[in-house]
Image (tube, grey):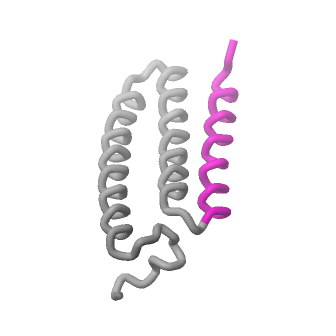
Amino acid sequence: MLTLQSYLTLGAIIFSIGVIGIVINRKNIIIIMMCIELLLIAVNFNFIAFSYFNQDLAGQIFVFFILTVAAAEAAIGLAILVALYRNKKTIDVQELNSLRN
């Protein structure tokens, strides 16, 4: 049987992969957005684990709100990315640091 510690360890591993992905990759905006989604998934995983083991539905309900915000963040982020690509012809973060030009 899986314990709470098993779920929290898996959540910590997923969260660490997301943080490492953001730290290592500073060039591609799409990869950075995917790593942010990994961070949100890890947090949701921990909420669901605590909710299940404490027999409380509040954590699971809170996950729906986080998923809604994550979907909005992805849609807005991709829209901004498309607009930047049309103007600058690149998605390299180092070249997008100046929004004046």
User: Does 69 sit above or below residue 9?
Assistant: below
User: Does 5 sit above or below residue 28?
Assistant: above
Give the residue displayed 53% in from the left and 58% down from the top.
32
Residue 98 horizontal/vertical position (percent): 42, 84
Nearer to the camera, 66 or 28: 28
The magenta segment: 1-25
Residue 52 horizontal/vertical position (percent): 50, 21
Give the residue displayed 67% in from the left and 56% down from the top.
20
**Secondary structure character of the magenta stretch overall:** helix
Q: Does the magenta-highlighted stretch encompass residue 85?
A: no
Give the residue displayed 48% in from the left and 45% down from the top.
40
- Single out the residue that lies furthest toward the top: 1
Nearer to the camera, 20 or 79: 79
Which quadrant is the N terminus positioned in?
Answer: top right
Give the residue displayed 36% in from the left and 82% down from the top.
99
Which quadrant is the C terminus positioned in?
Answer: bottom left
Left or right: 4, with 82 as reference point = right
Left or right: 91, with 1 as reference point = left
Residue 97 horizontal/vertical position (percent): 46, 80
